[in-house]
Amino acid sequence: MSQYPEPLEKLIKELKKLPSIGQRTAERLAFYLLNQPEENAMLLSQAVLDLKTKIRLCRECFNFSEEELCTICKDGHRDRSMICVISHPPELWKIERCNGYHGLYHVLGGLISPVNDVHPEDLHIDGLMRRIEGGAVQEVILALDPKVEGEATSMYLARRIKTYGISTTRIAQGVPIGRDLEFADELTLNRALQGRVSI
Amino acid sequence: MSRIKKTAGFIIRSINYGDTSRIISVLSQDEGKVSFMAKGARKIESKFGSALELLTLTEFVYYQKEGLKLLSQASTLNPYSKLKSDYDRLEVALRTARWLQRLLEEDHGEPSVFLIYKDFLEMLCSMLEVEHFALYELSFKLKVLASMGLAPTLDRCALCNKAPERSWFSLEKGGLLCQNCRSGGEAHERPLNLGIAKGLNMLLRLPFEKLTRIKLSQDVTAIGTKLIDEFTSHHLRPLMQQRKHLAQN
Ligand SMILES: [Zn+2]
Ligand SMILES: [Zn+2]
């Protein structure tokens, strides 16, 4: 079997390391790039490099940032009495796009998961406690995945935050909008009933 | 033709696969440790719902396709909610799931391991005192090792069968050694007080429900846990190498 020229082979190999890209897609992308003007290839490679050299973690909330403090932490219009705790930055942008929350965030960098040898000290939990000790925070909202590791992390955090005497809440769990109740999973439906609200 | 099969078991690991799927490891009732590919399990509208949550006892319907077990249905038999509503219990349960996951070989395993884990999780649900969790965890590990034919000899010298005056625990021989039988100065020998060995032996032999009635010193749990973890790792090393070797060929 004859091989592609070395540089092409190398690019295909690198592209294949990306999520949900297999051999065929990698080949298609590589050939596409090969047919592009050199300038486009430069822009792409520079953008990839910039990711690694220009982005760091925000000193306060551990969100991705270009400066020491991220744009949200620097924004004077945000409600500084609320911190929404999430596991990874993509969830932060998801919540931002909903446009319904105007407080601050805190990115843990994962979830407590003894099954995968991830323990509280491996996450940005001490940073969160320092922010709470700062005194301005009145409510911590836990917005973590509704699965066992998310629950474990929520319970652990709730226990630690309780010692500061501030309110800890958790986002509601229930039936997704636009779906039939009939097909809801029992555990989900149970949580939805527990979390019912007056109308 | 692929054949539809059914089994039940505890989910002891769940890893994301691709954008929407998961691979889950199960400690099953009748097939030991098995892994399933659960396509679309991460989607919010997944048909598997909460049945694929860690530490849930679930019934699985699957079929084998090209060396892969594809999950077609999953229904919760027991969610073990009590276990999941308390951090300390959950932490112990998840930690032991990891221990099992590392210890057991894929598509192998004693059916008794499932029963021991089930007993252990139920015990954990009903226990009130956090400070006892570690003792039960140690007893659980000893029981699992025993069911796999790795029970350490703790009441006599593993080589000459005599009751020793002073004793060492050999990670290699998997049990106590007396002054005469020990090789001396070996990296895998640990001095072990006979009293602690006796305590460990009780944790190995007594059923969970009897453990509340015995009084053991804190040392048994602390020293025993360290020793048994070392012993497990010592036995896992050749197993890991073997697995790696198999994977490469
Ligand atoms: Zn920030
Ligand atoms: Zn001897």
Image (spheres, helix red, strand yellow):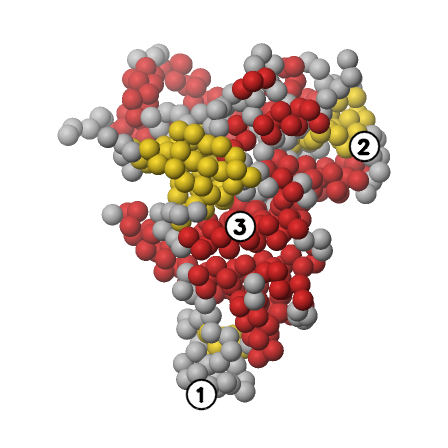
Residue at (16% x, 28% y) in the render = A2
Q: Chain of mark 1?
A: B
Q: CA distance from mark 3 to mark 1?
A: 41 Å
Q: Is residue A99 left or right of residue B62?
A: right
The answer as to whether callout 1 falls within 8 Å of ligand 2 is: yes
Splitting the image into 4 quarters, where does residue A65 fall?
A: top right
A76 up-or-down from A132: above or below:
above
Numbered disc in front, either 3 or 1: 3
Q: Secondary structure at mark 1?
A: loop
Which residue occupies the foreground of this view, B70 or B59?
B59
Q: Which numbered marker is on residue B118?
A: 3
- On the image, the x and y values in percent for residue A81 come to 81, 26
Q: Which subunit holds the residue at mark 2?
A: A
Q: Where is residue A51 shown, x and y percent of the image?
A: 52, 26
Q: Residue B69 location, x and y as percent?
A: 35, 36
The answer to whether residue A193 is seen in the rendering is: yes
Q: Which residue is mark 2?
A: A167
Residue found 44% across the figure and 25% down from its top: B40
Q: How many marks?
A: 3
Q: Which residue is mark 1?
A: B180
Q: Are marks 1 and 2 on the same chain?
A: no
The quadrant of the image that shows the C terminus of chain A is: top right
Q: What residue appears at the point 67 percent right and 59 percent down from the top-left corner? A: B132
- At label 3, the amino acid type is Lys
- As measured in the structure, the alpha-carbon distance from the residue carrying label 3 to the one carrying label 2 is 37 Å
Q: CA distance from mark 1 to mark 2?
A: 64 Å
Q: Tell me the kind of residue under disc 2.
A: Ser
